Structure formats: structure tokens, C-alpha cells
Image (cartoon, coloured by chain):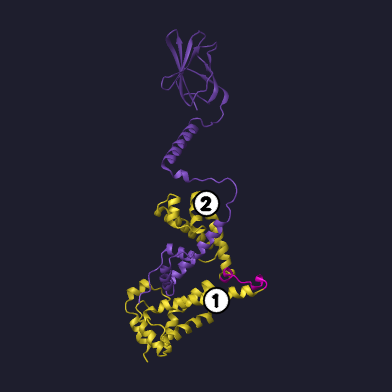
Chain colours: A purple, B yellow
Amino acid sequence: MHHGTHGSEEEFDLYAMGRLSAGRTGELEEHLLVCEGCRLQLDEATGYCLTMRQELLKPEAPGFRLDWNWLRMPTVAMAALAMLVLVFAGWFLYRPRTPLIPLATIQLSALRGEMPVVAEARETDVTLLDAGTQPGSAEVVDANGGQVWKGPLAEGGKLRLSRALAKGTYFVRLYDGSKLTREYGFQVR
Amino acid sequence: MTSTSGVRSQAVANDADVAEEMTPGNTATSQTDWAQVVECIRQGDPGAQEELYAYFGTGVRYFLLRRLGGDELEDRVHDIFLIVTEAIRNGELREPARLMGYIRTVVRRTIAGVIQEKINSRISYSDPAEVGFSLADWRLDPEKRAQQEQRADVVRRLLKGASRRDREVLRRFYVEEQSQEQICVEMRLSYNQFRLLKSRAKTRFSEMARRVAGRMGLGDGK
């Protein structure tokens, strides 16, 4: 005498809802008479189906409801990822930084020694202590030799860099005509 | 008169089959020679009746509890076995191999009879509320009610997290009782997608229920 096979999850759901075919219902019920494991599974399926039905019958809570299912589409997911990368890059490039102080001052000497340091600022006043009184022109270059500023040297060896300098090493070069006469170094930190 | 111990010795003929088909709570096996048990009962062997009761008692009780609740449970179980043994003695069970099917039929008839009786008695009442009796009441004692509330809470959370489409599929299946073929066609789903969706929801339900039950100390959350 064969006692039938165990029911499947699908069959327990259908049985719990009274939708299993008559033939299979008979077989399953005969099996349930003798199988404790299947009885437990049927109880679980019955509880689940009844509760699911009751809750689904209730109207959905009003209000805005986001449906993220469309994100599962590959093209949409790729586009969303690209957008995310762009937004991050934009934020990285234009991220807010610590506000700069309006003006920093530094005095430089052509003597060799430790390189003077000045804080980052929107403008920097540079005084060349041993520039003498001769008029001339000056140039500020960065560590790679890229020109940052160029203009006439004011009286007293002063010059004002009216733009913010990024952190790094800079050099001030003094010219007499086209001849380089002195060079000063400083760092912005 | 044949002793039932002989039946039992034949019953444990194949341990592998037993392990596959039966659970530890059951004493008989798929190899039980029901023809012999039926013959013993026919001859009035009380041991055979006991064996029958021991093997099917839990299952019969399960169906009665499931459909009728605990009222008069033991009396009904007793009545069912009385009907079965009487039928055997009177030679009404022509094919002993169909014993299990016969027991199932008697259980179904008993359940149908009780339900019909309840419906009739409810109709005869002037105030139906006085009857205080419904199919749902039979199943929900206070403990089960608490479990039901917990289940409802878990399902609510599960549905809240489901997409509109998933919810629609579940609604069609559990509420509108549409066939899976119809749902698959109308929702443009393959059978596997449908099955996966349903199974995923159920697995998620079980996990959430287990977590909640663990927090509340309610056992396994079933």
C-alpha cells in the first residue's frame, strides 16, 4: 500500500485555498493522514495564504508610493549609474572648500635657507626685502614653471597677487629688462 | 485470531522507505499489510483496532481540528473509528488496500455533516449572533489569534516593501484566485518568474516572521 508523495509548496498553497484538483486533493489528504511534516507545512501555507488574502483585500495606504522596479531594467540601471558618476565628479570638482582668508602677506629674501610659507588666501601681498629701489618687472611661476602672475614691481619691492594661489611651491623672478636678476621661493600651504 | 505483532513485523520491511515516507511520530510504515489488519479487525482483534487508531488517529484529529475546531474532538475521532471498524466488520470495505481512502471519506463526511448541522442550527436561531460560532472562531484560540496578528503585521510590512507589479501579481493569485496561466499571460510573466515571485514573497515572509517571533519569544513564528 502506497501512501502517496509529499505535497509541494505550490500544492499546499492551492489546497489551502481550495483550488487543488479533486484528484490530487484526494491523494494529498490521504498522505496528510499519515505525514506529520506535510501537516505542518500545510498549516504554514494556510496561515500565509489567509493572511495574504486578508491584507491584500485592504485598500493600499494612500499617499505617494515609489516604485523602483523599473531600475531593474539594464539600460535604466546603466543610465542611472552614469548619472551617479557624473554627479559625484561634479561634486568632487566643485565641492565647497574652507573659505579662504581675504589677504595674506609674506616677506621674501633672496638668501638661501628654509623656504617661507604663507597661508592660502584670496590675495597675497609679497614684499621682496632685498629687491633694491630699481624699477623692474616681476613674474611668479609655480613649481612646473607655469606663469602665475606677471607685472611691474611696485616701490619697496612690493607686489600683490590678486588671485588665490593653490597649495604648492612658487618662485618670484625679478627682471631687469629681459635679464633675470633675482629669484625668491615660497610655499603656499 | 491472528496476532497483530505479525503485522507489525511485516510492517517494518524496508527502513529506507520508512525514512523517506514517514515522520518519527508515526509507528506504522508504508509497507503495512492493511489486508491483514482489516482481516484482524473483521475477526474482532482489539490489537488491530489499536494499531489502526495509533496510525491514523493523529491525522484524523488534524483534519477535524482544522475544519471544526476542538469541540467534541475526541468524541468525533471515536465515532469515526467506530464507523470504520463497523464497516470493516460488516464487509463494506471490499478492497482493504483502499483503507486509507475510506478513512479519508469518513472524515470528510463527518466534517460535512457537522458543518451542515451547524448551518441548520444557526438558521433556526432567531438571533444569529447568539450562536457565537463561525468557521474562523473554530480555528482561532487566543494563542493562534496572537500568531495571526503577528502574521498580519509581517505581511503588511512585506507588502509595503513590494513593488506595485509584485503586489498586483499576488493580489490576482491570492484574492482574485486567477490561475497562474492567466496571471502569466496578463502580467507578461514566464511561469518561472511567477513562481519565483511567489516563492520569494513567502521566503521573505518566513524570515521576517521568524525574526519577529524571535524578538517576541513566540516560538517558530508559524
- Callout 1 touching callout 2 (CB < 8 Å): no
Residue A112, given in percent of the width and then of the height, sits at 44, 20
Q: How many marks?
A: 2
Label 1 chain ID: B
Label 1 sits on residue: B114
Q: Magenta stretch?
A: B126-138
Residue B7, compared with residue B208, is above or below; it is below
The percent coordinates of residue A57 (x first, y second) are 56, 57
Q: What secondary structure predominates along the stretch shown in magenta?
A: helix
Amino acid on which disc 2 is placed: Gly
Q: Let me know if residue B64 is in the magenta part.
A: no
Which amino acid lies under the numbered mark 1 shown in the image of this protein? Val
| The N terminus of chain B lies in quadrant | bottom left
Quadrant of the image occupied by residue B39? bottom left
Q: Along the horizontal axis of the image, is A129 left or right of A29?
A: right
Q: Chain under label 2?
A: B
- For label 1, the SS is helix
Q: Nearer the viewer, residue B122 or B84?
A: B122
Residue B47, percent from left and from top: 42, 87
Q: Secondary structure at mark 2?
A: helix
Horizontally, residue B156 falls left or right of residue B191, namely right
Name the residue at 59% across, 73% down: B119
